[in-house]
Image: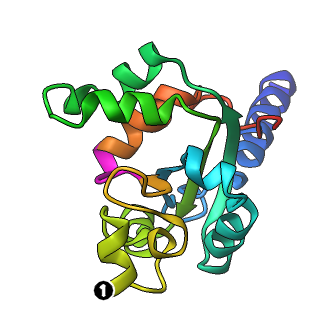
Amino acid sequence: MASHFHRFITVFVILVAFCLNRPLCRGEREKEKTLAIIKPDGILGNYSDKIKNIITGYGFSITREMRIQLDEDAVRSFYAEHSSKSFFLSLVKYMTSGPILVMILEKDNAVADWRKLIGPTDAEKAKVTHPQSIRAMCGFNMERNCVHGSDSTQSASREISFFFDVQDTRHDEL
């Protein structure tokens, strides 16, 4: 009897310790995640640190980040939904023109808040209508707009898994 009791207590303690590290077990909502990319013009223009400071200043946590150089196959796969559009080939060329910084951002309402912070897709329009946005700060035009943001929680999930093993929560080395 004592042996069963000790096993029960051991299992109970392990479960409680595991649960204390989980937001849902503490009655908290898990924060929303979104994917953010600083594109080649943002990296080459040395905007990475400024953008990361803006991100954290607006209450986002950067839970993962990775600096990489994409090849054509990766860009074609990531942007497959745009493959039939007229700008697709120039998008592939642009996104392979230099390294990018890929980040997972986390906070309540992360997708919508990140989209609001980056501003309109067309950086020229952003400079007029959203002058405080990231795209107004470092983008050039519709294509060279400095940053990417997922457009929905479904896209965010798919895009995050494209770049990161979501089971592994360690920060990647840059």
Residue 73 higher or lower than 160, as above or below: above
Residue 99 higher or lower than 116, as above or below: above
Asked if residue 163 can be seen in this view, the reply is yes
Which is nearer the eye, 82 or 15? 82
- Disc 1, SS: helix
Q: Position of residue 97 (x, y in %)?
A: 55, 32
Which is nearer the eye, 86 or 16? 86
Could you say which quadrant of the image residue 94 lies in?
top left
Please report the residue visible at 73 percent of the width from the left and 58 percent of the height from the top.
Answer: 46
Please report the residue visible at 36 percent of the width from the left and 20 percent of the height from the top.
Answer: 77
Color theme of the render = rainbow
Q: Which residues are magenta?
A: 149-154
Residue bearing the label numbered 1: 129
Question: For residue 150: magenta?
Answer: yes
Q: Quadrant of the C terminus?
A: top right
Q: Position of residue 61 (x, y in %)?
A: 65, 63
